[in-house]
Amino acid sequence: MGYRTSPSSRPTAGGARGRGQPWPALLAWAGYVVCLAATGLGMPVWEGTVRPEHVGILLLAPLLLGSGTRSTPVPRPVLVGLALWLAVGTLSSLLFAPDPLRSIYIVALITASLVAFVAVSRSRVDKALLVEVGTWVLAALSTGSLLVLLLAPEYPVGTPWVTAYGDGYGDGATGRIVGLAFEPNIMGGLSSVWVALVVYHRRRLSRAALVATSTIVLAAVLTLTRASWVALAVTLVVALVAARRTRAVLLATGIAVVAGVGALALAVATAPRDAPWLERLVGLLDLSSGTGAFRVATWVQAMQDLAASGSWAIGLGVNTFQQRHVPAPGAAPIEYFSNAWLAQLHDTGMIGTVALLASLVGLWAATRRRLDALAVFATLAITAAFANPLWFAYPWVVLALLEFRPRRPSAGNARIYPMARVSHLERLPRTTAADFLYSRHRADWDERLAASLPDVHRSALPGILVRVSRRNYATIETPEPLALPLTGHLVALSVLVVGLNALLGRTTRLVCYALENLDPVDKLVSRSRLPRWIAIALLRASWAIILLGMRRIAFGTEGALENYRTAFGPLWRRVESRIEVAVFPALPAAAEKLGPRDPRQVCFLGGFQVNKGIRELLAAWPLVEQARPDARLLILGQGPLLPEVLAVAESTASVQLEVDPPRDAIRDRLRSTTCLVLLSRRTATFREQVGLPLVEGLEHGCEVVTTYETGIAQWLVDHGHRVLERTDPESVAGAVLDALAHARTPEQIVAPLPERDSRLAADAWMFAQ
């Protein structure tokens, strides 16, 4: 046996001419291939038939028990999809089949075929070697059929290997090759799909096996099944497109020549003496009369049955079409519904059909050399459109003989920030390595800093989704689920990641850092004027999808955790059962450099917006200045209230304004500041989650004056800072004056802070494997 090896995929044992090959396993495999082909043989048992392939499955044991390296297994999601397909078929059979036991019998046959599928896919004998042996077995069977066809002058009903075709049996009837198969369509399907498998493994098969394939091609042509003809043509096209070597071109050309010669011989042999042979050949492709018309009629009837029942979800039961349509006396029995794909819709409904098709697509996606593998899947799809071979083991065994790519380990991580800010960039060098993907940025963005950092990429949502689909990320940090403007982004991302995990066997995890402490339902109702019950239903439906791929949520405050628990309602049980949750209080580590500071300096840092309290501070400042004439107010930031701030700064000597200062300047100003003020106000759509200015003020040892709207209000109260319930001028001025009068040293203020920035600790936890 002239089997060939390659350095990247060497057989279990031995080299050319079969020396050292695992002969017991190969002999058992040869016997099993005969069983696969002998679908027309069987022993009646109850109302069914036990065929050789059902008993022959025991011959697969040597393939699993050898000493070679086990083949790459079928991806688990594919097996899950096939199990769902069987489960739906079983359920619909029990509920709707006129004879449930007969339908369950078919389910059992399919289950046995899938057992063979799994067994062959895990073979310890090299798959190309199995294809080599199988090719010789099928070539021998095809040769036997061809000899009978050539040597028998007439083709009565009882002739082995050949079945009659024509207006009558006996004299003048044309022989259709059937081999040992159930019918010519099954023989044609087996032969054509095996030819596609040979093309797939062509680089590692011997020349003799490739030559022997020609008999299989000719047998497929002479089954007179139109699907086999089309399938062979598709295999030829794929082989030519995928050809990178002369050998592939020669093989494809050889297939074409054999198919063409066979077609010509068939046309001449089947044409009556008084009719042109071309007209007879065209007649073989006719769907408006004869067998073709009968098939179309049954397909239409099956869909009418399904529409009348309304059971589109799970179908009417496995192989129940002939149970509902008993042929008239003397008519040929309807053995099965002769279109595997419409049969799935009829038998298992939309759910089962989608599960099966998704499994097949996933299986193709997992193969090596997908273009070559496409011929196998296309051939199976075409031949199954005129028969229902999925009962039998041969299509599943052929699929199992394809080579599957080992699951690639997850590579790298990603962070997705639809709205990025400069603090994200500053933190990147100290966080887990990951691609930083953002769509827009805030006004404080530093383009030079972004350009200096690796793996920072700007892209709209479609580009981000494409990048995620192409890269097998291990972990992706997403915006938090309660970020309402980004709900659509999160739903799309979750669906994509969950789908890719299921289809390609990936293990990508979604994680997030959560700070939202405002009721999202109130926020949505305020923005959209929707009834509250509709807002709750919409949000929880979206969150249910978002949580499908979520594996860890790091909360920055206890208030955010409680807000999520309340907002999610019943969904919170899913969080507790499937998602890891931890709280990392949003506190910074102390800055490396503290002071020296100006004991007179008060600082406002943030946006010049109503909800940041800039108006309240400006209203209180005259009272501060009156009680403390040496006090100085430094205002850093920008925003829509800039004209008001500018007017005060120009008219008040103690007020200094710096519009949108660079980050280094902000840090310098904070080091010299004694008291930092941020008087956050709640609105219908806003509540301060933490307040980055507060975090940066604490980091540099500033006394803080703020309100209870921040998520770290209680920590500030517990550690001697001023947290206000009211923001009238007197209350604000009193707090600022108290902070200046009783200021602690920067070292005392930073002493309670954690040694490691809590946001960095949360990052390490989220991305930990």
Image (cartoon, rainbow, N blue to C red):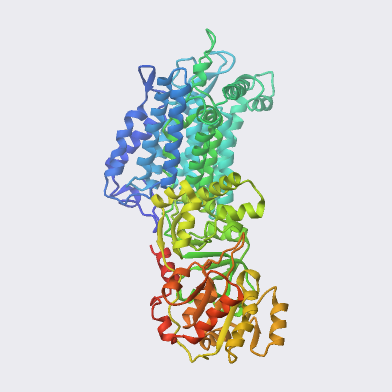
* Residue at figure coordinates x 61%, y 83% from the top left: 623
Q: Quadrant of the C terminus?
A: bottom left
Query: Quick one: 3 or 475, which is closer to the camera?
Result: 475
Task: Determine whether 463 is above or below 495 in the image.
Answer: below
Compared across the picture, whether 2 is left or right of 517 comes to left
- The quarter of the picture where residue 91 lies is top left
- The quarter of the picture where residue 714 lies is bottom left
Compared across the picture, whether 756 is left or right of 282 comes to left
Compared across the picture, whether 553 is left or right of 284 comes to left
Task: Determine whether 765 is above or below 266 in the image.
Answer: below
Give coordinates of residue 274: x percent, y percent: 69, 18
Residue 154, can we see it? no
Task: Determine whether 111 is above or below 165 in the image.
Answer: below
Give coordinates of residue 576: x percent, y percent: 40, 52
Name of the residue lying farthest toward the top: 329
Query: Quick one: 674 or 625, which is closer to the camera?
Result: 625
Give coordinates of residue 347: x percent, y percent: 51, 27
Residue 596, can we see it? yes
Q: Quadrant of the N terminus?
A: top left
* Residue at figure coordinates x 39%, y 50% from the top left: 577
Give coordinates of residue 150: x percent, y percent: 50, 25
Task: Determine whether 523 is above or below 604 in the image.
Answer: above
**Count of residue discs:** 0
